[in-house]
Image (cartoon, coloured by chain):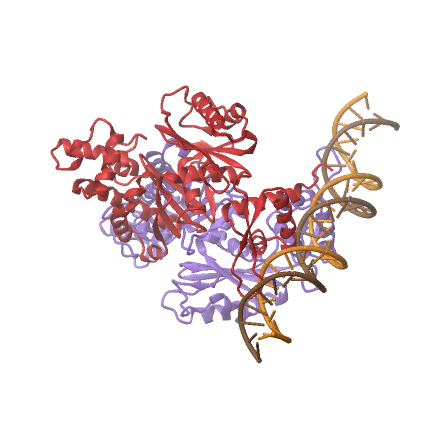
Chain colours: A purple, B red, C brown, D orange
Amino acid sequence: MINEKNIKDELKKLIVKHLYFFSEQSCSDLSGHLKKNLSLISKLVNELIAEGMVSVKGHAPSSGGRKPQLYSLKADALYILTVAMDQLSTRICLVDLAGKPAAEIDMNELPLQCNPIALTSLAEHLNSYINNSGIEKSKIVGIGIGMPGLINIKEGINFTFLETGGQSLTAYLTKQINVKTYIDNDSSLIALAEQRFGVARTKQDVMVMNLGWGIGLGMIIEGQLYRGHNGFAGEFSHIQLSEGGELCSCGKQGCLESEASMLAVARKAVTGINEGRISSLKSTNLDSYEAVGNAILDAALSGDQFAIELLSDAGYKIGKALATLIHIMNPGTIVFSGRGARVARILLAPIQQAINKYCIPRLVAGTELLISELGFEAQLTGAAILVMENY
Amino acid sequence: MINEKNIKDELKKLIVKHLYFFSEQSCSDLSGHLKKNLSLISKLVNELIAEGMVSVKGHAPSSGGRKPQLYSLKADALYILTVAMDQLSTRICLVDLAGKPAAEIDMNELPLQCNPIALTSLAEHLNSYINNSGIEKSKIVGIGIGMPGLINIKEGINFTFLETGGQSLTAYLTKQINVKTYIDNDSSLIALAEQRFGVARTKQDVMVMNLGWGIGLGMIIEGQLYRGHNGFAGEFSHIQLSEGGELCSCGKQGCLESEASMLAVARKAVTGINEGRISSLKSTNLDSYEAVGNAILDAALSGDQFAIELLSDAGYKIGKALATLIHIMNPGTIVFSGRGARVARILLAPIQQAINKYCIPRLVAGTELLISELGFEAQLTGAAILVMENY
DNA sequence: AATTCTTTTTAAAATATTTTAAAAAGAATA
DNA sequence: TATTCTTTTTAAAATATTTTAAAAAGAATT
């Protein structure tokens, strides 16, 4: 028998996956969701218990009959190594099947741009992190990495950063670390996180805005992450907002990113302060846009008028772009996530205002705007999901 | 046994469906596509032959072994009633399983706007058409209707036309005609037709532009028609193109529809001619925008400079809007279909020009632009597909 | 408190589907 | 031309999955 028990094992993996996303499920819950017969599910769940993958978690209240037994994954049965990169730094965290950190988060500078040793450096970091964690490698199901750039997830190539001359990043890391590795775009992973464990939980058609140094868009269509024909879907930041606006890094003018990203806002703040605008931002080191950007968020949250004005302006522009997105996609939900989610409450009013102005009312009515609760954690959570989706 | 043979029958229906979309398939083709075992497929195909649904269509060339036998549906085993409506007229055609008309196409005026008897009139028309066709009702699998408007396909309600006070159009027609009836948006059906039997055959991520009195968009995402959270996805015609442009019927300014649809072009033509522009259009009845619109297409095809200028202008605007669409969706294919597909060759140059200007090169490179070959037939074809998808 | 009704879980029987093996038909090659 | 190799089709055996039935556990009702 070449594929002895293969089909049964596949189904067991499906059960494990399902329990990862929806813990505390009864056999009939599982049966309903996986569209497999109860009796089969029951048998396999018992096998999983015997194997130490699953444990019983007490009873749920009954609606007039025998109380269902609830099953969950044994959190320490397996671990996932999650990695969240942005252009400047990298966070690493080993988590268990319940999403709890099994070792401290490691945060270190790892500039992606013009850094030929970034990849080898990353591999070394990951190896030593695992060694220090005290968890044996065999218990780590996989490594999930979210990174900015245009990414081919199948081949494991990043066309924008970590240049390898067409070589597969995932193949390299899998070999170096000896644990199966997966990569994906940061905004896509944030969208996954919001739809599986965040405010868009169980929603089917969700657009997740990743508000950060750029403006990313992760799209969930009919419950699945949509990546487009070449994996470049959601290049929302470079749609044209206004004829003849600011020059963008992409070479075009008036892109959303060059008008409303955190970097664009920081640039405007520096100009404004140099022109004598009154603001608490004056005391910030104006040489680092990164520092200015973070300071704007803090200032806005503590009521600084100039900062709020800058963010409101950005919000209105984001809203205008969202109006177009809503017309095309008719999403049920839009989530504001990423670094900038902290100030989403301030952005929301001008965003809503622009949407009202530029959208057909019937479409506005069908779309809810939500603010992320996962915040900065979203990308790490998404990286874990990436691994479990491939389990 | 309550569901005796249900599962087997389901699979048989899947085989029939598959043969509808891909005729002349061998058992191994079917096995591969349906992901069911060859031996099972072989048995069921033989049953379908015995039932008179399927027939053998000779052999395909072999690649070094026994020649595969090819199977097709018996074209006259079942029939489909297809209906294509636009705001002014309705086409009806009974087709067989090979897509061949089994009765002549019926084309009649049926204005949708402010016409309370449109629905009863439609039902009468359909009934008498069936009676005149000579095909017995029991052989008609279903009625598929494509119509403009915001449509809820599950409930069978059109929110824009054929007002029934929230009653289901499909329930009414199914009862009146005694044949299961389905409705869908015209642009959605055109997209279906292009992806199943048109130039976008087998492509997975396709945006189909329905160039007509309005500008519609049908979206195929990962091989499936995407309708959005409330069924209103693809409301492409009302995205804003230019700040402060022409007033649109939707109440906003500068919408794509009010700037570049066939109706908008006709309006501009009338203005131009009244201002003394030289053109063969002068001899057209300028009171009917419909007549002017059609005349512009003819004039442009025979080289009239004014008509070509008008269409080029519209094309550039469509291209600018498409640039945004490409950034968001990263589609593999864009198809120009519908009434205006006749002049797509003239529109293509300015469309491409605008896309080049407003798109990131890497995204342009991944998207091919195609011109429909189904043309005006697409909507009827799509209506047949709608029925077979529900078979 | 006893009975009836629900729901979950388990086991046995029935059915569906896949694997394996073998036969049939033909292409490629020596 | 005979042999070997492929591929398709069919049949038999093995496996997977669902149905059916029954037991277990508890809620609701009389």
Q: Quadrant of the C terminus of chain B?
A: top right
Residue A204 x, y percent position in the rendering: 51, 42
Vertical position of residue A391 compared to residue B293: above or below? below
Q: Is residue B363 left or right of B305 when viewed as pictured? A: right
Vertical position of residue A349 compared to residue A71: above or below? above
Q: Nearer the viewer, residue B80 or A59?
A: B80
Residue A327: image quadrant is top left
Q: Is residue D24 left or right of A212 when viewed as pictured? A: right
Q: Is residue B263 visible?
A: yes
Q: Is residue A296 visible?
A: no
Q: Is residue B41 left or right of A220 when viewed as pictured? A: right
Residue B64 x, y percent position in the rendering: 55, 66
Vertical position of residue C6 compared to residue B98: above or below? above
Residue A109 x, y percent position in the rendering: 43, 64
Q: Quadrant of the N terminus of chain B?
A: top right
Q: Nearer the viewer, residue A102 or B377?
A: B377
